[in-house]
Amino acid sequence: MFAKIIGICATIFIIGKFAGIGGEQVKYFTDIAKITLTQHEVNSIAHQIYGMTIIDGRIPDRSDEDWAAYIRANMKADIPGRDSAKDYWDKFYNVHEVDTVPGLSREGFVVRSCGPDTLENTDDDIISGFEYNE
């Protein structure tokens, strides 16, 4: 999947050069590719962590550093040398328990990327998670 996204980005860049597309449009298309790759990673991390909840029904209480170490140990980076515990904007993924839909659902957990603006809890955050089984 990663190779396809890189191929698409390279094609957009080359076409952009010939068609006169400016740097802002290239950045826009690059962000779309990064968002797609990050959503895939966030989903994979959430599925990996969800497997742990089968043991006692909840995710373990870990520090941000411990979650980063867990992600590195269990998720292979798509690009050699890239830190798999960070998103494509070089920010660490956050893992925490939440009420997934406040007032309407059970407790669960989410894995969150800060997204293109690199700020937490904004509209462009990329999120995946699960509700706990009762």
Image: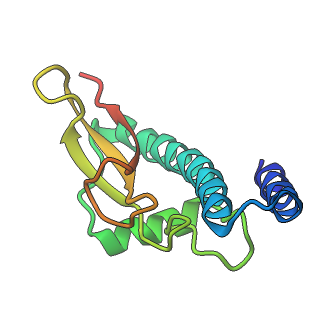
Q: Quadrant of residue 30?
A: bottom right
* Screen quadrant of the C terminus: top left
Q: Is residue 113 above or below residue 72?
A: above
Question: Which residue, as the protein is rendered here, is positioned at the far bottom?
Answer: 81
- Residue drawn at (46%, 40%) of the image: 51
Model colouring: rainbow
Q: Is residue 23 above or below residue 134?
A: below
Task: Give residue 93's position: percent from left, percent from top.
Answer: 41, 62
Q: Nearer the viewer, residue 78 or 59?
A: 78
Q: Is residue 68 left or right of residue 31?
A: left
- Residue depicted at 78% across the width and 47% down the height: 1
The residue depicted at 36 percent of the width and 33 percent of the height is: 130
Figure check: 106 above or below 46: above
Q: Give the left or right position of residue 3, taking residue 105 as reference.
A: right
| Left or right position of 131 against 126 | left
Query: How many marks on residues?
Result: 0
**Which residue is painted at 24% across and 33% down in the image?**
100
Q: Position of residue 20 (x, y in %)?
A: 80, 62
Answer with left or right where residue 95 lies relative to residue 15: left
The picture places residue 127, in percent across and down from the top left corner, at 40, 44
- Pick out the residue farthest to the front: 20
Foreground: 51 or 55?
51
